[in-house]
Image (cartoon, rainbow, N blue to C red):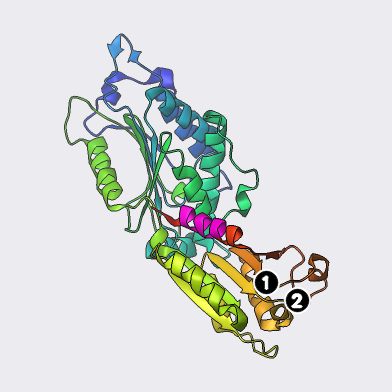
Amino acid sequence: MSVNSVNWSSYHAKSGILDVHFEPVVRDFPEGLESFINRALELTDLTKHENVEFGRSVKEFRILDSFFSDTFSKEQIRNMLKKSKRLSSPVKFLLANPYSEFSKSRSNNIFLPRIQEKAEVESRNGLELILRAMSSVFNITIPKQLSLYNLFELISLVNLKKEFVELRFYDVVPGGPMFFFQDILVTGRYDFGVSSIAMPWYMIINDVYRENDVFDMHWKAFDTLWDLAKPSIVENYRLRLCYTQDQQDAVTRVKDRLNAFNLNIDDAMYPDDVGQAWDDAKRERIKDCQEVLFMCSAQALANPSFCAELSAAWSMAKIIHPILCGGLEPARLNALPMLNPDICFIETNQKHMENLVSGIHERTRC
């Protein structure tokens, strides 16, 4: 159904359902769903049809999705942001907390092959889409290498622009995705083992002359989830401190600062014994954190276990802070065993440590 063929009786149908889309064959980006969403966005530009005024009682864009990584194209996000800018109303994004049980179950059921931390990866991809669209619409500067950023850094970058976008994360199980384009709703459903893009989608119109219609029921459901959701996932944040015995005093000072932020801190002290074994338990603890601070002496860089933990953090795309405590010529670092050549240790000072702690605080505050 084209925009020009919308008829008034359908618009004010008691059910409010204007159109249905179903494309069971899932591709990388389904053209049918893209067209369906485009038609809904186009309808928001209509003010009248056949000499009958549209109600336009809702002047807000709202998005509820799991990870927002594969439903919208970047151009569609830009289009939505431009429309919300004209309304002087920020877009509300309500996304799944990637560390919630719902997200873990959802990502394991629909993403194949299954890989570790898939929910976190998909959330990063979704936030990157939002940020790149924001940069072009609102003429803001964002880092070029967003794909290298930690999830918490991406969240903090979005939250700096709250006049354009409001972001919250839910932990509960919603019925399905809901995209409110002012008084037009595009909604689907979640099902076990199937991506929502392969399920039926409905285009629902708000009937301004009828209370508690289908549109209103979904709007109230969004309100409930929004009130339960949180603007941050800081409670899921965990920092790991890895250090050698000779750095205990420096680590204590850093921990005292970080504890004031009520963060989850997991620490591991490595003795200077180069024969200390690396085990799977340490690797599991690395997976559960988002940021790793390595404070070591030059001697520690000869410890295979310490270097293995450093390399594991790097390969898992964690934020890492390699801090060298004690003199060592930078040229010698490249010759150290088991050390990823892309990891650059810097020698710390008081100002650098203050900036590091402040950066962690900025990324994790609500």
Instruction: Calculate the distance from the C-alpha at mark 1 to the C-alpha at mark 2.
Output: 8 Å
On residue 302, the disc is: none
**Horizontal relation, residue 11 to residue 240: left or right:** left
* x and y, in percent, of residue 95 in the image: 41, 50
Residue 30 visible in image? no
What kind of secondary structure does the magenta stretch mostly adopt?
Answer: helix
* In magenta segment, residue 10: no
Quadrant (top left/top right/bottom left/bottom right) for the N terminus: top left
Q: Secondary structure at mark 2?
A: loop
The answer to which image quadrant residue 354 occupies is bottom right
* x and y, in percent, of residue 329 in the image: 80, 68
Q: Is 332 in front, or is 15?
A: 332
Residue type of the residue flagged with mark 1: Ser
Q: Is 232 in front, or is 62?
A: 232
Label 1 vs 2, first from the N-terminus:
1
Residue at image point 65% right, 72% down:
310
Q: Secondary structure at mark 1?
A: helix
Residue at image point 29% right, 28% down:
58
Residue at image point 47% right, 50% down:
155
Q: Which residue is mark 1?
A: 311
**Horizontal relation, residue 197 to residue 135: left or right:** left
Residue 163 visible in image? yes
The answer to which image quadrant residue 17 occupies is top left
> Which residue lies most toward the top here?
51
* In magenta segment, residue 361: yes
* x and y, in percent, of residue 326 in the image: 69, 73
Determine crowd level at label 2: few under 14, some 14-19, many 20+ residues with C-alpha closer than 10 A: some
Task: Give the residues in magenta.
Answer: 354-363
Q: Which residue is mark 2?
A: 338
* x and y, in percent, of residue 287 in the image: 54, 71
